[in-house]
Amino acid sequence: MQQYLFFSRDISWLGFNGRVLQEAANSSAPLFERIKFLSIYSSNLDEFYRVRFPVLMALANVPKPGEEVTDHRGILNEASQLIARQLDEFGRILQEDLLPGLKRHNIHLIYKEPVPGFLTGAVTDYFYTHVLAFLQPLWLRDYSRKFFPENNKLYLLVVLTGADGAEETAIINIPSDALPRFISLPYNGTQYILFLDDVLKLNLANIFKHYTVTGSYSFKITRDAELELQDEYEGDLAEKIENQIEKRDLGLATRFLYEPGAATRTIFNLAQTLGITSSNMVQGGSYHNLKDLSSLPIGTYKELSYQSWPSVSPKDFNTGLSIFDTIKNRDVILHIPYHSYNPVLRFFNEAAIDADTEEIYVTLYRVASDSRIANALISAARNGKKVTVFVELKARFDEANNLKWSKRMKAAGVKIIYSIPGLKVHAKVALVKKKNNNRTEYFGLLATGNFNEGTARFYTDHILFTANPNLVRELEMLFIFLGYRQHADKYPALQFNHLLVAQFNLQQTFLFLIDREMQHAQRGKPAHIIIKLNNLEEKRMITKLYDASNAGVKVQLMVRSICRLIPGVPGMSENITVTRIVDRYLEHGRIFIFHNNGDTELFMGSADWMNRNIYRRIEVCFPVLDATIKQQLMEIVQLQLNDNVQAVQLNQSGENTEVTNNLPPIASQQEIYNYVKALQA
């Protein structure tokens, strides 16, 4: 049997973040949007250190039992070196390109330079008026375990000299969680912007009045974010989750990031005092948490941001009919965020008030902080509807918000089904049951993304409204399963013939569909697979795609982030291409297209091809059965495959390379927006 090769998951992940950094360097993008891409890069890197770096460190020391033979220490070193190169590029882009660009618009971000004297009075006034109330200085000589640097919070290490000439050190918090990270001060026609860090540094003498400040250096500690939830789940799971969230920011340190310039002994003394090992120490820049750059107060310079693309109101729902009457007549699809999200809100709002509505079921994975959908579900319950909501409490970094909303809904009479032991529910589905003349009618939502009106503004997703009995009846079966599975391992035997549900038939069906394309190729017939995912990691699925390539199947992949498949290798993947698209919106939809000798089958859904999605989650993918909608999706996918402006192609080394397809310049997101507008004409 041939031994296939795979990219490292973590190096591929960092490669995607490198693509984000490329967009920050893209001179054709508006200036503030490029700054936002730096912010995204910084936020992603923090998440990598919280989620993946602990795994790399553990594997480098003690491989998991049964783990494949892999040079984990080599991957750890490669990741560290790659991050270092990217951070050098980050600094170059910011200092040599973006900051001068801001100055050309009379915006001066003071970055690693003295605060001009004409601003010191205003800065000192801001310090006394706004900052001082939030400061808690701590002498290192008085350090006790009561002080615990919180995850990704900002601190200053202050080096002082007393009247007797003795050196002292102190720690003081930079209260960026309570105050804006930046202060804007107009002066003589120029907008000066200061980091809160510099406001504090400029006024250290006003805090340590009997000392001479000889140096101040920012630092932060990043901590392991994994929730240590075992599979037994005895007792109240919600309470367990809540307790673990409180512990998350007390996790083991995975990175001690510090500003250069301090004496080595001073930094190592601080690290030792805080219980940080030398292997976790990383020298950074003068400022940390540069994800805050997205909140830079630059005013209303329209030319610095993307031209607005007002969302399109879908004509299918502009008929004056109830949304359910429209869905009863035909399937309707939304392409978010090009389409308005309002029909999704209408779906839940109308269900909540409609006298014919009897039951509402929905899965919520990431709930918006001010969720109108959750409020509609609360109203539905108070209006006497039977409302059942599956809330996934293990959605990383959204646990607290999901828990908050689940408590509110439960108090209003909504039946809340919490996380299933050993499984996450990542499916994005909803079902409304109505009674019409003693006949039950079913209406479903099946989506590639969360029911979250916040992320719907900048995630590209597809949402299908359907009353197709083959789909909605199986959707009801899924909710029945979730209700049983919460309480016991035993549940009714279920068979899904149309929906693809992880734990039941999802992987098997995709393997069958790939096999079928291979059979067509072997018979000399056209064979073609197009797959769009966020992440491609699971080896069995990748191996099957390698097999398909070797059988002569043309395989076109669009993988936004992690991709372990190595494309273009003779004898392994020579018929496979992989592209990435990074633009103003985050590509999020999952689409699977199988040529099937001209009788094309197209599926969408929530599932990436990762170990967690296939083996440890409830995912739902679904066939697109309406011919018009299927054609729309295929045309949208073709625009993405033709993208030669915002897309890059992965080479055999995992590098992001230019797409050269001899077509006129095509930026797919712009073209898709134009396409969606034309649909409404």
Image (cartoon, rainbow, N blue to C red):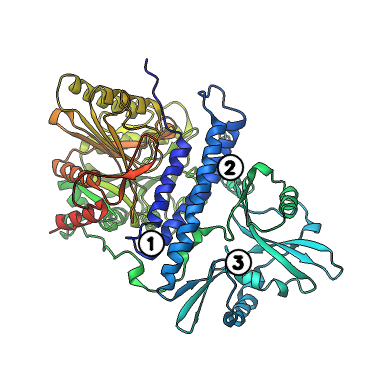
User: Which residue position holds label 1?
Assistant: 33
Direction from residue 388 to residue 461 in the image, left or right: left
User: Which residue position holds label 3?
Assistant: 197
| Position in image of residue 249 (x %, y %) | 61, 49
Considering the image in quadrants, where does the N terminus appear?
Answer: top left
Residue at image point 21% right, 54% down: 671
Q: Residue furthest top?
A: 1
Looking at the image, which is closer to me, 396 or 549? 549
| Position in image of residue 198 (x %, y %) | 60, 69
Is 637 above or below relative to 233? below
Give residue 74's quadrant in the image: top right
Is 531 above or below relative to 681? above
Q: Earlier in the sequence, mark 1 or mark 3?
A: 1
Q: Amino acid at mark 1?
A: Glu
Q: Amino acid at mark 2?
A: Lys
The secondary structure type at the circle numbered 1 is helix
Considering the image in quadrants, where does the C terminus appear?
Answer: bottom left
* Numbered circle sitting on residue 240: 2
**Crowd rating for badge 1 (residues with CA inside 10 Å; few <14, some 14–19, many 20+):** some
